[in-house]
């Protein structure tokens, strides 16, 4: 099994790259999906978050209020670190379980399985250190802000604040083995991902 890490800042186009890689036959482990899974009602991480931050970060149904949580942590580095201390170990454990499931599934396949770990915090979580291949998706910051405003309705100032809470491109590029620049349209990106796939296959 070949595992490659995929990361990039908000609005860079990382999820689109993951989708294109899946179209080439890769299996995607989505860390955002895992992050939602590990804080579902009744899980120890959600209980720990409520104990640390108070019930105001929970909805009336007992789920995590992500907007309230974001409002707290993206403007306070210490609170962000407190949240990550709760969630990162649980996310890492679940990702490991999923990778082991892919490894077991590969035993019945004729070719090597390629698994993409799509993780916005690949650098911050330390997982990049364990991977031989790290793909970083980049795009100019203002283009990313524009995409987030148009595609997700995120206020530009809020988008910039969230970006500052993540690793910057210099930190990502320092560990990158491959870089995909996403400063054009979707067809350009699709072609670049196809080139990446052929390079990885070789």
Image (spheres, rainbow, N blue to C red):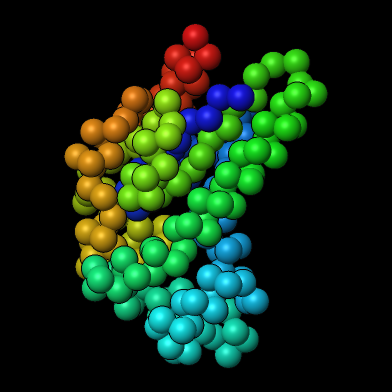
Given residues 141 and 151, the one toward you in this image is: 141
Given residues 14 and 188, the one toward you in this image is: 14
What x and y, as percent, mark residue 29? 58, 43
Q: How many marks?
A: 0
Q: Is residue 136 left or right of residue 57?
A: left
Q: Of all residues shown, which one is farthest toward the right? A: 108
Does 167 sit above or below residue 193?
below
Residue 185 visible, this orientation = no
Q: Is residue 80 left or right of residue 13?
A: left
Does 84 sit above or below residue 176?
below
What residue is at 65 percent from the left and 19 percent from the top?
112
What x and y, as percent, mark residue 171? 23, 41
What residue is at 48 percent from the left and 89 percent from the top?
55
What x and y, as percent, mark residue 138? 30, 38
Q: Is residue 77 left or right of residue 195?
A: left
Check the picture and name the quadrant holding the N terminus: top right
What x and y, as percent, mark residue 186? 43, 36
Q: In the figure, residue 80 lies in which quadrant?
A: bottom left
Residue 19 visible, this orientation = yes
What residue is at 33 percent from the left and 62 percent from the top?
149
Given residues 145 and 81, the one toward you in this image is: 81
Does 78 sit above or below residue 50?
above
What residue is at 45 percent from the left and 14 percent from the top?
199
Q: In the figure, residue 130 lies in which quadrant?
A: top left
Does 190 sit above or below residue 30?
above
């Amino acid at each position: 099994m070949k595992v490659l890490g995929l990361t990039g800042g908000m609005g860079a186009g990382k999820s689109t790259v993951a989708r294109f890689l899946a179209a080439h036959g890769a299996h995607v482990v989505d860390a955002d999906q895992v992050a939602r899974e590990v804080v579902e009602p009744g899980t120890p991480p959600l209980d720990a978050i409520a104990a640390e931050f108070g019930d105001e970060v929970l909805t009336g149904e007992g789920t995590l209020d992500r907007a309230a949580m974001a409002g707290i942590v993206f403007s306070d580095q210490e609170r962000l670190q407190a949240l990550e201390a709760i969630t990162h170990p649980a996310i890492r454990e679940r990702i490991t379980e999923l990778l082991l499931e892919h490894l077991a599934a590969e035993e019945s396949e004729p070719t090597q399985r390629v698994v993409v770990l799509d993780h916005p915090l690949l650098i911050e979580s330390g997982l990049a250190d364990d991977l031989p291949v790290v793909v970083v998706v980049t795009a100019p910051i203002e283009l990313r802000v524009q995409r987030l405003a148009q595609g997700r309705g995120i206020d530009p100032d809020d988008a910039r604040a969230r970006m500052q809470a993540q690793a910057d491109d210099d930190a990502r590029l320092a560990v990158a083995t491959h870089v995909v620049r996403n400063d054009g349209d979707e067809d350009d990106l699709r072609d670049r991902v196809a080139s990446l796939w052929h390079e990885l296959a070789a």
